[in-house]
Amino acid sequence: MTRPSIYLDHNASVPLLPEAREALLCALDRVGNPSSVHSHGRAQRAEIDAARAAVAKLAGAEREQVVFTGSATEAITQAIVAGARAFGVDGVVVSAGEHAAVLKAAEATGLPVKRVALDAEGRISIEQIRAAVAEADLVGMRLLVAVHLVNNETGVIQPIAAIERLVGPSPHYLFVDAVQALGKMPIDFASRAADLMAVSAHKIGGPAGIGALLMKAHAAEVRLIPGGGQEGGRRGGTESTALIAGFGAAAATFADHYQRAGVGELVRLVETGMRETAPDLVIFGADAERIGNTSNFAVPGLRNSVAMMGLDLAGFSVSSGSACSSGKVGPSHVLAAMGIAPDLGNCALRVSFGWSSSVDDVAAYLKGFGEVVGRHRARRVAA
């Protein structure tokens, strides 16, 4: 019997959309440097400009605010490391639940880094942000606050509007990691108080190896790679027209594909079905506002390494959290920051759905999940 092959790890990387594949392949067949003034170069530039407009529209940004980078990690590093330097800040504030790219970039500034807590549902503490800003104001320090809009492990939507009200009208600066939010909810960069925001192509069905940093006009000096003046002098290096074209095509079509898949209903179905199989199931962030495609959960006593192996052998690709943290199954710093006990945190799994997911995927997964839980229970009885 052929096992299924069902991908339920869209927060790690999204399958390439057909429109993005076509745009990528077509662009690979064309020659020219987008900085050249001849016809081939102008054609490349037109391709990049069209993609920039599509990304800007999806992000609620102005076209000139979109700067293409080699990845979201590069965009994050540019925002935090180069931003700290350009803005002349005295310290960085992050939450304890940030993606590793944000945490490591904050450390790389060489400045004091303050980590604020998450509550039990995975929400960033507004009170601790307020206290950090007030403390800095008392001594005349300027801060760069770096926070995420949607947590990649739990799907919890963060109180960005409240954070903006604290940071926006102050002498401090705000960077938002919107990688998991783009295409799934409005982010409206142009109208937000955030100074900088990072997004990624492969999280919306575009190719890996291309991201973007959204920048307000006053942040134009936030440069990490000076290069030859590409991207308005904000990110040097010859642009990859093919990857950018794929990003643009994904940005233009992802939201429609995502909505047609009915992703929010799939999460409801999978969580209901898992609770029927395992009444002791714990869903992390269940009482917080969550993005509609993510469920992070645990069956107490069933270690995620065992569950993932069983599900993988049955043909289901799930994860234990961020694919970028270590490349292996281990404890989640996000769950630890939420106060989740290590014994339960080591049982955590994440399923995340996207444009290619279906009700049939959920039904097949619930059958496989039931078999894994059933074997776990049988072993416990035998012991």
Image (cartoon, rainbow, N blue to C red):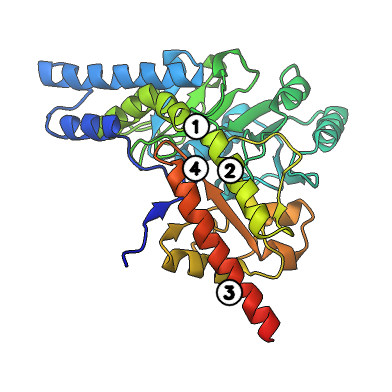
Q: Are marks 1 and 2 in contact (CB under 8 Å)?
A: no
The three-letter amino acid code for the residue at tag 4 is Phe
Question: Does residue 212 appear to the left or right of 35 in the view shown?
Answer: right
Dot placed on the residue nearer the N-terminal end, 4 or 3: 4
Mark 3 lies on a secondary structure that is helix
The residue that disc 2 covers is 269
Quadrant containing the N terminus is bottom left
The residue that disc 3 covers is 375
Q: Determine whether 230 is above or below 381 in the image.
A: above
The three-letter amino acid code for the residue at tag 2 is Leu
Alpha carbon separation for disc pair 4 and 2: 12 Å
Mark 2 lies on a secondary structure that is helix
Alpha carbon separation for disc pair 1 and 4: 10 Å
Alpha carbon separation for disc pair 3 and 2: 23 Å
The three-letter amino acid code for the residue at tag 3 is Arg
Question: Does residue 100 appear to the left or right of 41 in the view shown?
Answer: right
Dot placed on the residue nearer the N-terminal end, 3 or 2: 2
Q: Position of residue 353 (x, y in %)?
A: 49, 42
Alpha carbon separation for disc pair 4 and 3: 25 Å
Dot placed on the residue nearer the N-terminal end, 3 or 1: 1
The residue that disc 1 covers is 262
The three-letter amino acid code for the residue at tag 1 is Gly
Dot placed on the residue nearer the N-terminal end, 1 or 2: 1
In the rendered image, is residue 326 in sight?
A: no
Q: Are marks 3 and 1 in contact (CB under 8 Å)?
A: no
Q: Are marks 3 and 2 in contact (CB under 8 Å)?
A: no
Dot placed on the residue nearer the N-terminal end, 1 or 4: 1
Q: Residue at x 76, y 51 (%)?
A: 338
Q: Position of residue 334 (x, y in %)?
A: 68, 52
Q: Which mark is residue 280?
A: none
Mark 4 lies on a secondary structure that is loop
Q: Which mark is residue 353?
A: 4
